[in-house]
Image (tube, grey):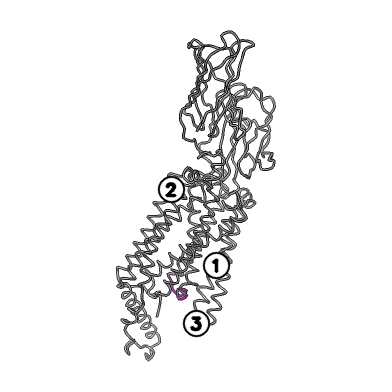
């Protein structure tokens, strides 16, 4: 009896097509929602400070510009560029100098001597230790701010069309891995007869093809993804060579080599193994394939663990093997789910025993996922504020909610599995009649034709009877619902792998919800009395900072005399210091607008926190005082 004979009825054909259309629509919907609101991928490392600071005005030209980061990074030629007001290079180094000491990660470039006054732009780009590109730009001024022809880059590294294609390839790679590993495990562990089923063979082979193609695309796009953002640079041989020298490039090449071994595994699984009829020999071959396939699958999973979030941060030696277990459990569960869906819709021979074996495999996978997921969540989030106040934490909450929905649907599938029987087929299948016997036919060609017709007719009858089974129909519907949720879950998981972990985001921001985006805040209003000790030396300083958040702010200062009227002073200076992160003092020199009123625009607050604001007031040639007050900004 052929296990691959198609069913002639219209309903079973429409159902798989409808299921495929539904899954494709869900993929499109998920990417539309997630990529539309995601922007470029965030990274593990973050800029924590610079010298000169963003927006600072220095009296004399510095000898060098240095940048500090929260985690280890990889830099290359032109990773840090300093541009003068006309857009010309003001730095002397093409490759930044590593100035790191201990746990402090710092890089710098030397500047030309004799730089004129004006506003200078620092543009930087690097690769975080977890393989994601990071970039940014800021300005500082020598002497006094000036106009500049330099336009700050609007697109972050890893963004644009190249970033979108790279993220799609990343998702496809996860999907291909799930189908390849999960489908193979389903055949070996749950349904050995599936090795001869053409739909099962196609599922696993397509998983291999998808993973291979996605890995090649990621390898070619890695250079423009972390650099120029131009598709044309995908075939730059020098850029490709530089990618091969990095940890992510080595991981992608290793994955391609392991996929070569996976191709041999597939050939044996659906070739020699499928044709083997002796049960003892088949059992031995099953063990060999399970061991070999397990080694290859573990190696492929390790290519993710060795190059992404698990490879950096706290407890990396523990996190990497935990991440491998997590990926294998995902593949066994979701890949087995996809295999069961195909088997229920496209093959007539899968029995209740195979379904129950998969139910046990799925349960074990969920247990492993729960254990490894809890550890990963603690490691990547670390606090309740990071769970609710960072993008990574919010995606993690969404992932947990989807897993809960998936488990709820799986509970219904388990109920249908408990009711599933094979007796309906055995009782209603007609015995072979003499008219169907072809061995006596003298024409071998006609005998073969009649054999094919008989096999197709028998398979059609068998599938029609099973399609009419209410338990089997209920199981198909619940498994389809599980697969639909799994598509969304896999997309959210992909987004998590390209998002900065909540723990590091909070650490980079000094314990606040966000370091890479302007933090929500409100206008800051301060009132500070002063007394310089001289004649007419008493008064009050009033300061307004708007919008009172990280990024660019407008600052206004009013000075009132002891009589409550506006008071002019010869000199007024301010400085901002974030003592908890050793940032500052960042000088601010406001311009006089009117009697007793000064202002400064584009005052840069690089990080949210409890800032100390120092105000120096000079009321005569010898009388001055510095007062300070703390204010929460961001």
Q: Position of residue 174 (x, y in %)?
A: 50, 57
The N terminus lies in quadrant: bottom left
In this figure, which residue is indicated by the disc labeled 2?
A: 34
Q: Nearer the viewer, residue 131 or 597?
A: 597
- Mark 3 Cα shell of 10 Å, populated few (<14), some (14-19), many (≥20): few
CA distance for labels 2 and 1: 33 Å
Residue 415: percent from left, percent from top: 36, 68
Classify residue 276 as left or right of residue 77.
Answer: left
Q: Residues within 10 Å of mark 2 (few under 14, many from 20)?
A: some
Relative to 308, residue 197 above or below: below
Secondary structure at numbered mark 2: helix
Residue at 43 percent of width and 45 percent of height: 36
Residue 433 is situated, as x and y percent measured from the top left of the image, at 32, 88
Which structural element holds mark 3? loop
Earlier sequence position, callout 1 versus callout 3: 1
Mark 1 or 3: in front is: 3
Q: Nearer the viewer, residue 190 or 254?
A: 190
**Residue 592, above or below 313:** above
The boundaries of the magenta stretch are 192-198
Q: Which of pointers 3 and 2 lies earlier in the amino acid sequence?
A: 2
> Going 63% across and 43% down the picture, which residue do you hit?
75
| Mark-to-mark CA distance, 1 and 3 | 23 Å
Check residue 193 for magenta coloring: yes
- Residue that numbered label 1 is attached to: 263
Sequence-first disc among 2 and 1: 2
Marker disc for residue 277: 3
Give the overall secondary structure of the magenta segment: helix
Going 55% across and 72% down the picture, which residue do you hit? Answer: 289
Disc 1 on helix, strand or loop?
Answer: helix
Q: Quadrant of residue 256?
A: bottom right
**Residue 537 part of the magenta segment:** no
């Amino acid at each position: 009896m052929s296990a691959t004979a198609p069913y002639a009825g219209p309903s079973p054909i429409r159902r798989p097509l409808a299921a495929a259309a539904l899954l494709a629509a869900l993929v499109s919907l998920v990417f539309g929602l997630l990529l539309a609101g995601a922007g470029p991928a965030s990274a593990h490392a973050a800029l924590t400070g610079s010298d000169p600071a963003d927006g600072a005005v220095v009296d004399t030209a510095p000898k060098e510009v240095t940048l500090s980061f929260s985690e280890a990074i990889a830099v290359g030629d032109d990773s840090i560029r300093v541009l003068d007001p006309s857009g010309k290079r003001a730095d002397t180094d093409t490759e930044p100098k590593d100035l790191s000491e201990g746990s402090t990660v710092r890089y710098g470039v030397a500047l030309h001597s004799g730089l004129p006054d004006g506003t200078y732009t620092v543009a930087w780009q690097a690769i975080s230790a977890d393989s994601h590109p990071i970039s940014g730009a800021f300005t500082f001024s020598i002497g006094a701010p000036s106009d500049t022809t330099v336009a700050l880059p609007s697109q972050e590294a890893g963004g644009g069309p190249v970033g979108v294609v790279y993220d799609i390839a990343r998702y496809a790679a996860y999907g291909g891995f799930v189908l390849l590993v999960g489908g193979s495990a389903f055949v070996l562990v749950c349904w050995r007869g599936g090795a001869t089923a053409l739909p099962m063979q196609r599922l696993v082979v397509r998983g291999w093809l998808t993973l291979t193609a996605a890995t090649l695309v990621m390898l070619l796009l890695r250079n423009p993804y972390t650099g120029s953002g131009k598709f044309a640079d995908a075939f730059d041989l020098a850029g490709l060579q530089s990618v091969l020298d990095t940890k992510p490039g080595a991981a992608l090449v290793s994955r391609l080599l392991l996929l070569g071994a996976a191709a041999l595994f597939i050939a044996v699984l659906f070739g020699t193994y499928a044709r083997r009829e002796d049960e003892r020999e088949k059992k031995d071959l099953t063990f060999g394939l399970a061991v070999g396939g397990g080694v290859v699958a573990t190696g492929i999973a390790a290519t993710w663990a060795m190059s992404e979030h698990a490879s950096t941060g706290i407890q990396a030696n523990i996190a990497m093997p935990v991440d491998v277990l997590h990926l294998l459990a995902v593949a066994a569960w979701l890949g087995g789910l996809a295999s069961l869906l195909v088997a229920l819709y496209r093959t007539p021979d899968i029995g209740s025993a195979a379904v129950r074996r998969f139910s046990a495999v799925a349960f074990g996978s969920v247990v492993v996922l729960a254990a490894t997921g809890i550890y990963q969540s603690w490691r990547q989030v670390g606090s309740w504020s990071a769970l609710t106040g960072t993008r990574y934490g919010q995606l993690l909450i969404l992932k947990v909610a989807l897993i809960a929905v998936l488990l709820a649907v799986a509970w219904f599938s388990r109920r249908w599995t408990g009711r599933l029987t094979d007796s309906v087929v055995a009782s209603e299948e007609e015995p072979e009649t003499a008219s169907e016997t072809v061995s006596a036919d003298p024409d071998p060609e006609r005998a073969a034709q009649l054999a094919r017709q008989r096999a197709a007719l028998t398979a059609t009858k068998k599938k029609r009877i099973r399609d009419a089974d209410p338990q089997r129909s209920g199981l198909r519907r619940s498994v389809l619902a599980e697969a639909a949720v799994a598509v969304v879950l896999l997309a959210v998981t992909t987004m998590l792998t390209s998002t900065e972990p909540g723990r590091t985001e909070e650490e980079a921001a000094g314990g606040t919800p966000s370091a890479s985006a302007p933090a929500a805040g409100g206008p800051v209003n301060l009132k500070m009395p002063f007394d310089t000790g001289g004649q007419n030396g008493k008064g009050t300083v009033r300061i307004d900072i708007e919008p009172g958040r990280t990024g660019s702010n407008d600052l206004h200062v009013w000075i009132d005399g002891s009589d409550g009227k506006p008071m002019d002073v010869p000199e007024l200076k301010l400085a901002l210091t974030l003592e908890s992160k050793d940032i500052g003092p960042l000088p601010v020199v406001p311009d006089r607008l009117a009697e007793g009123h000064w202002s400064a625009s584009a005052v840069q607050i690089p990080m949210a926190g409890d800032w100390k604001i120092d105000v120096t007031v000079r009321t005569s040639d010898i009388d001055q005082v510095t007062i300070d007050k703390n204010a929460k900004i961001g």
